């Protein structure tokens, strides 16, 4: 790698979550086009546009298990990417987690009624999958195998910000990206539907603005916080949406920036 960039494809939508499968295909969650696959030869294929008879309104993030199953989120079945603020203001569970078998073409909703289903990550043993519920400030766990198979529980909640992307470190931990900290105005409005309706009618320029803050958190597989890295003023790298650990470095994606951030941190060895 020489630091240069190249364009792999134009999806004509809004690509969000990305993962390579075992065959070298780039699997894409596109907010407007659904679940896509980009072959090594550049051919772009649509895998899914609906699941269980419900259109994919806001395909968001994905993770691919060793058996080939693609776990991905439909952030909201009511509001698309253009209207995500309305989803937050309505504060109802329109999100879902979906499992897709590319060999059979079968897809099913494994978890629904999620509050803006966002980032996805598998455990080191792949016995559970995590999904971020952005507007509930929490991460939910769905058990894939074991005695709790098919059940879900709260992995961590009462987070200090809005969880977006989550990824496995490869060391038995997870990296969680929080684009901004909690907004006291948003917290205050939640019990008052009429206030939220007023805000929903305001133009974007008049709505409360998120604070420019950079925050990532490392969690163990029991949901305990191991450490957090902060940019309190958002001067260097605010609105972090994703974290990927590669060769002892953290690569950061951002909602508003024009580049990829790189952080060298003292990382714990794999247990």
Image (cartoon, grey):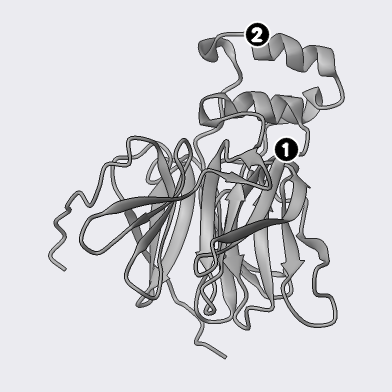
Query: Could you say which quadrant of the image residue 100 lies in?
Result: bottom right
Give the total number of marks visible in the rendering.
Answer: 2
Q: Earlier in the sequence, mark 1 or mark 2?
A: 1
Within the image, what quadrant is residue 98 found in?
bottom right
Nearer to the camera, 126 or 214: 126
Q: Is residue 58 above or below residue 174?
A: above
Which numbered circle lies on residue 239? none
Q: Is residue 215 visible?
A: no
Quadrant where the N terminus is found in the figure = bottom left
Q: Is residue 33 left or right of residue 135?
A: left
Residue 212 lies left or right of residue 117; in this view the side is: left
* Residue at x-position 59% and y-position 16%: 207
**In this view of the protein, can residue 83 be seen by the observer?**
yes
User: Residue 94: which numbered mark, if any?
Assistant: 1
Which residue is denoted by mark 2 in the rendering?
201
Q: Nearer the viewer, residue 71 or 128?
A: 71
Q: Residue at point 60% right, 61% down?
A: 106
Across and down, in percent, residue 90 comes to: 75, 25
Measured as percent of width and height from the top left, residue 258 is found at 29, 40
What separation in Å lies between label 1 and label 2 (alpha carbons)?
Answer: 21 Å
């Amino acid at each position: 790698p020489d630091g240069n960039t190249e364009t792999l494809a134009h999806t004509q939508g809004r690509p969000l979550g990305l993962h390579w499968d075992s065959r070298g295909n780039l699997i894409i969650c596109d907010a407007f086009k659904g679940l896509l696959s980009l072959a090594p030869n550049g051919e772009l294929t649509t895998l899914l546009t609906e699941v269980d008879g419900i259109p994919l309104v806001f395909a968001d993030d994905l993770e691919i298990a060793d058996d080939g199953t693609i776990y991905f989120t439909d952030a909201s079945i009511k509001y698309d990417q253009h209207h995500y603020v309305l989803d937050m203001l309505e504060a109802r569970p329109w999100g879902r987690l979906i499992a897709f078998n590319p060999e059979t073409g079968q897809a099913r909703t494994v978890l629904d009624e999620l509050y803006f289903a966002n980032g996805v990550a598998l455990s080191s043993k792949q016995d559970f999958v995590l999904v971020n519920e952005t507007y509930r400030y929490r991460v939910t766990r769905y058990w894939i195998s074991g005695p709790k198979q098919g059940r879900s529980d709260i992995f961590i909640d009462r987070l200090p910000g809005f969880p977006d992307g989550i990824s496995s470190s490869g060391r038995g931990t997870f990296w969680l990206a929080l684009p901004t900290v909690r907004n006291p105005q948003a917290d205050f409005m939640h019990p008052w539907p009429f206030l939220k309706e007023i805000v929903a009618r305001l133009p974007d320029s008049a709505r409360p603005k998120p604070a420019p803050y950079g925050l990532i958190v490392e969690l163990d597989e029991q949901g305990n916080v191991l450490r957090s890295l902060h940019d309190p003023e958002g001067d260097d790298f605010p609105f972090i949406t994703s974290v990927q650990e590669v060769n002892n470095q953290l690569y950061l994606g951002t909602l508003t920036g024009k580049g990829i951030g790189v952080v060298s941190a003292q990382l714990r060895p794999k247990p």
